[in-house]
Amino acid sequence: MSATQIIKSEFSFSYYLKITGLLFTFFFSSVILNGQDVLKGVIKSDEGEPLPGATVQIRGTNLNTVSDVNGIFSIQSPEKLPFTMLISFVGHQNKEIRITELQNTIIEFVLLSDARLDEIVVTSRRRTEAVQDIPIPISVVTGALINDAGAFNVNRIKELVPTVQFYSSNPRNTTLNIRGLGSTFGLTNDGLDPGVGFYVDGVYYARPAATTLDFVDVERIEVLRGPQGTLFGKNTTSGALNITTKAPSFTPGGIFELSYGNYGFIQAKGSVTAPLVKNKLAARVSFAGTHRDGTIYNVRTEKHTNTMNNLGAKGQLLFTPNDNIRLTLGGDYTRQRPDGYAQVFAGVVKTQRADFRQFDNIISDLGYDLPTRDPFDRVIDHDTPWKSGNDHGGAFINLDVDIGPGTLTSTTAYRYWWWDPSNDRDFTGLQGLRLSQAPSVHNQWSQEVRYAGEISNRLSGVAGVYFLAQDLKSNPFHTEEAGKDQWRFSQNNTNPLWETSGLLDGYGIRTTNRLQSVTTAFFAQADWNIVKGLHVLPGIRLNYDSKEVEFKRETYGGLDTEDPDLLAIKRAVYNDQEFQASVNEFNPSGQLTVSYDFNKKANVFATYSYSFKPVGINLGGLPRESGRTMLELSRVEPEKVNHFEIGAKTTPLKRFTLNGVFHFTEIKDYQTVVQTPDLSVNRGYLANAERVRVLGFEVDANVKINQTLALYGSFAYTDGKYVEFTNAPPPLEEVGGPSFKDVSGGPLPGISKYAFSLGGELSSKPVKFIGQEGRFFIALESYYRSGFSSSPSPSEFLNVDGYALLNSRIGYKTPDGLSLFFWGRNLLDKNYFEFLLPGAGSPGHFAAVLGDPITFGGTLRYAF
């Protein structure tokens, strides 16, 4: 694509966002303005402050809504008067109001405060509960904070929840971990299952690329820490991100938001909901679009790269034929077309190879030098285009039926993923690796049926069955292709035949592969209240996994020759490989939690769980030994996880929560990706470390000083190490020495020992500004993490320094739903690495994924 075409594309994208917002407003205004009677009100505390998020219900109907950030609500009235309205807000006394006539004015309702803090309600245990009452370490990020803090994807959520780690060199190569565990660090091999479950509206998203998507119309995100296999359909050994989007409502409403910032940032988001058939059928349609220019300059192409270019939309229908049945049909589509994820040259180390195989000598012999050796110059000269075409979509049907004391839920879903990448894996302007592409297509089908509810006054729980089928295949093939300079990178002796003109130019491999997998499971967890305050919660999971792989790799190109010596050189770089493999495992697992509620202000809990991560299979090629393909490495043993934790949740003072937990996890046969200097093993291969352990403690606090000042803080100490890993690959600086190394006692990659988030918001008393009464506010969010290893085997050089980020926003909001604020991220303009990774073939250089520089802008939002 030419520069002119790119400019046109970006202009069209921005124009599209603006026009889309206008069309949304016009199209749905006829639905919302339908002439039905609407009751409007404002909910305030006994201190005279608005109460955002208060629940409003019409007794005997399905009509309900919540108040907005200014305490304002509007709700459709029943056909007949009088009716009773119920208003509730955690931390305040419920209120019932008898409505005998409708008024055209906004009615004020006052709720009296009680002694408890405003609590957040979640559904992680498949029923509605206050988060402080759940014996699980859980962090909740509300949709309001997500929107205000600009945390529109998982990478930004980690700044609010320090126990979450997120690394992405592109959407496919994405790692989402909790407490340092979950997925392999740095590079993705499709033959492994993630250990952190990623759920949206009850649907499991199987591919890690889904975690790079922009959020669309999120109500809240629940981050559950520790194994959750007895609560969720898909097994999760490290935790889960349970995302709930906003549901259709029978009360008309909507929100539109437009943001502008530096680097050409523009983001538009909108959502509209309305009844289609009174009290029976409602709809919600949402969209989000983000564009930002690149933050890295490519001197070869003379343009910036690492752009954002994302579009997403979601639609839902809610059908309620009666009070006991709720049927939701939803569909979504997200499209990402960034010019990026380019990595920058970050440094070079001397390996144990001969001098002529060192990176600096290689590029000197080729008459090349880097445009800069300072990664924070943000300059590259890569000759292979970077692109990451990433499409996700799907549909689901969710049926909730109230039966007896509980609810029977059926969730049926289909999802697909389409991936079209291009990478420059030598990280230079040389023609080392000309092509590195792994286009893929993935389809998944899932079905979950569960029952959750109160079985008796002392016994409640959840039980369900789950089915997941996946089909992942190359589309049509994966390609690795050498360029004219690759001979010098691959040269392993001084034989002059390496310099044969065109020997490796255009020489490469095309790989077709397919992975088909099936997971079936039964899961259950009970909550038995033995005596007042004492609960015992046993859980069980029975899981069966089956995986089948077809792998075929064929060489092509390069110099057409019959010379056996030249052919031997070519085969030393790339070789043909073909294998079929299948694995299957049946794994029982379970957990036991004991909790005790001292009173409404404090409860403690202790948990032991035995869980597993399913059997894996290599899907990126296998390494060779003395010219032999090591087929015995095709199978990767399942992880066996023993996990302990003990914690407390307290509300020591009114509007103040303080929670803490200590955790210890030991894993046998830890699944890891082994980096290898063998170019033909695309992105490394999978292996097992004998034993690892992770321990730590976490503290979370929230305090609301008054109606104008709220503060929060989270701290995590995490220590992870290889207890035993005797056959680890050598780190980058030891390439060329022994093939394996004992790294027992070394740190696990990606884990910072210390991490914390600290923030708060201060708002003014109501004031009049630009003819409107509203509030000024200022908010700060800070995030810190200490340094961590960025190498599967501990390295002296591949370590990321600790860093701190400061974000802020300041603005004004009115009771009418209008808000305007200005924001800044990384206000101290801190230069930092997300993580480091070695160059292909391990000649000694390594690259970095850079964190964003300082960004700033403004947001205009209107809710109705």
Image (cartoon, rainbow, N blue to C red):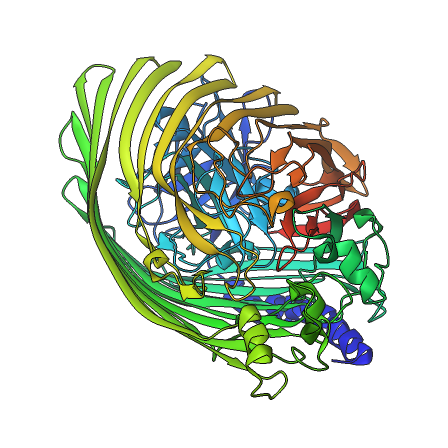
Q: Residue at x 38, y 53 (%)?
A: 193
Question: Where does the image place residue 701, in percent across and percent down from the top left?
Answer: 53, 21
Left or right of residue 395: residue 658: right
Count of marks placed on residues = 0
In the rendered structure, the answer to whether residue 744 lies left or right of residue 542 reads right
Q: Nearer the viewer, residue 346 or 420?
A: 346
Residue 327 versus residue 804 in the image, above or below: below
Front-lying residue, 670 or 679: 679
Residue 816 picture quarter = top right
Q: Position of residue 217 (x, y in %)?
A: 53, 54
Q: Is residue 219 left or right of residue 776?
A: left
> Which quarter of the figure is the N terminus placed in?
bottom right
Q: In this picture, is 714 found above or below 585?
A: above
- Residue that appears at 34% across and 57% down: 279
- Tell me what residue is drawn at x 71 percent, y 30 percent: 766
Name the residue nearer the viewer: 853 or 632.
632
